[in-house]
Amino acid sequence: MGSVVEIAPLTRLEGHGSVRIYREGCRVERVELNFIDSPRLFEALLIGKSFAEVPEIICRICALCSTVHKVTALLAVEDALGIEVSEVTALTRELMLQAGMIQDHALHLYCLVLPDLLGVRGVAELASVAPELLKAGLAVKKAGNTVLETAGGRLIHPVNICLGGLGRSLNKKELVRLKDELQQALPAAQEAHRLFSTPFPFPELPEPAFLALQPSDRPLGARLCRMADGPTFPLRDYRQHVEERVVGYSNAKLSTVQGKEATVGALARLNLDPDLEPLAAQLFATHKRELVGKDVRSNNLAQAIEMCHAIERALRLIDRLIELGPQRASAPAISPRAATGSAACEAPRGTLIHSYSFDAQGLCTMADVITPTALNQGALARDLLALACAMEGEETTRMTTALERLIRCYDPCISCSVHLLTL
Amino acid sequence: MRPMKVAITGLTACSGCQLTLLNCEDELPELLGLCELVYFPLAESGNVLDAQFDAAIVEGAVSTPKDLELLFSLRNAARVLVAYGTCALFGGVAAMNNTISCRRDLLQTVFGDAVQLPESFAPAPLANYVSVDAAVTGCPPEKQEIMELVAALAAGTLPPARCYPVCTECRSRENLCLLLEKRELCLGPVVQGGCNARCPATGIVCEGCRGPVREANVAQELELLLERGFGREEVERRMSRFKPGWNYGQRR
């Protein structure tokens, strides 16, 4: 007889989701992944808003990722309107993205994944079972947050970054303080890989098709996407390569890239010959065999290494900002024009693409946001089915626990993923 | 003292308000010590919503039947229900087009015509459906506000409501007035303070993320902005970003 097991709500991840496992006897027929966050409809809400409003509104898609959404939106609008920014502005933005990477990975690893490793229910029990570990993790997270708050003027939904420039640039005293904070967090971040290097003991999963942006020399200047074993394609043409379709049971859309279910995020970046800072490069070399060509269970380890990399890179960016000194120039006058612009950044969870069109008055006529979680969703669904099939006959709670842990490996952000565009 | 039983969750929202709590890194262990988290899916597994508890802290607007269902069960089980953040209090960004476009059109723009559209109605504040005992505003709220809230609840009381505009704190910080001196579209005069004028202090106008202050002189703000050459349409669009349906004639 057929039966359905439901895991709802999915916990320790951002947003509302559920999983249904359909079984015939003990044979798994199908697994349904539902992202049931209420539809937020940002792409529709932005139509008719002015170009200046777009980045301020769109960052509200998601709190965890608000910085990278805002930066990507700024880059896309600037691309459309032909606005150039100063080096200080570009560096400050990249500094904020690195800080976002630090705090986001730290939150995921220490607050959401660590409970699985220690067999507790969540962050409250962690506080009594492993107070020192939790404290160390929170300290790393705090270093990232302090940078975000100082550079962004606010931690969630930053205000200091705006079109063409900054509200104000950081002074030397602030930069030195941030440097201190980051240096203090570095040792813990350097050790994090030890905690997360053992993949969860469930059966091997299909090998992912990794996708990431090709690093560029200029800060935030990436204009090319590349896929393992596939051609590199310019970001401008992303619509020809990324296909989205609506599935009836979920409020997010499924994406495929060049016909494949792509995997984006920390593991994908490390697999596509990354440009790592020295300490992170050492860690990567030590763990290469556990990372290259491996399935998504290694994503937590990849995040731990990236956390170290992000701190090192942030320190380097701060040194350069101190060297340059604060900028005096105010943001340039911006005149609207009918145009389309696109941009992409590597968000903590993977490649994030924004694209907007404006009319001659500068009002938005088209908005398109492709989030890492939307890109990952196809691969996640595929892996869930593979894992459920491999665990056929096992006790139901063992299976649901394993599925939940698998989902957490992808570090999905459901808020982000449930507002995708028209096809 | 028995730790109070608390549920923390979100409806139609970005999780930013809940995250603000997790961002209180230094205070988090102590705050967690005051609470027994009976339901907090963002950070806890294995919670079920069945027993009675002391307080529900709810972020987000109500825009789907599922939101409503969750809100009702929280209201039924909690002694105190707190609207946590601008969306829960005023509708927030999700509601910005409530007065100018219909929900179905928005859904179709995003999901197309081909499929069954998700069930969704115009996003509304919690108080449109249930009684709300306390409120914390902000998109997102300030860290000290959530700490204040948890501390107040643990002490068996409620946090005080703030009833002064952003300008009060902005002037006391001696910031340059972006509205009068730089002639920018700043909403400080009609928006609830408590953020210590965060945005104007970095040279960015108040976008109104904390919603209307009590007794806001909306008509005067509108006149001021029109005099400075902003179009009525632009002003209304900006003011609706976090709360639709201002009373533009209100003068007090």
Image (cartoon, rainbow, N blue to C red):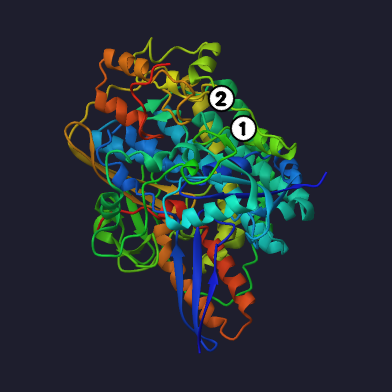
Q: Nearer the viewer, residue B30 or A67?
A: B30
Name the chain under label 1.
B
Asked which secondary structure carries label 1, the reply is helix
Residue under the point 46% across and 59% down: A268
Looking at the picture, tell me which residue is in the foreground, A340 or B236.
B236
* Residue type beneath disc 2: Gly
Q: Position of residue A401 (x, y in %)?
A: 62, 70
Of A79 and B179, nearer the camera is B179
Q: CA distance from mark 1 to mark 2?
A: 8 Å
Query: In the rendered image of this protein, does residue B181 appear above or below residue A280?
Result: above
Q: Nearer the viewer, residue A281 or B89?
A: B89
Lower position in the chain sequence, tag 1 or tag 2: 1
Position of residue A70 measured from the top left corner of the image (x, y, whole percent): 41, 39
Residue indicated by mark 2: B194
Q: Amino acid at mark 1?
A: Glu
Which residue is tagged 1? Answer: B145
Chain of the residue under the numbered disc 2 shown in the image: B
**Residue sitting farthest toward the right:** B1
A162 on left or right of A332: right
> Is circle 1 on the same chain as circle 2?
yes
Dot label at residue A359? none
Numbered disc 2: secondary structure: loop
Within-10-Å neighbours for mark 1: few <14, some 14–19, many 20+: some
Tally of numbered tags: 2
Determine whether label 1 and label 2 are within 8 Å by CB: yes
Q: Is residue A121 above or below residue A415?
A: below
- The quadrant the C terminus of chain B occupies is top left
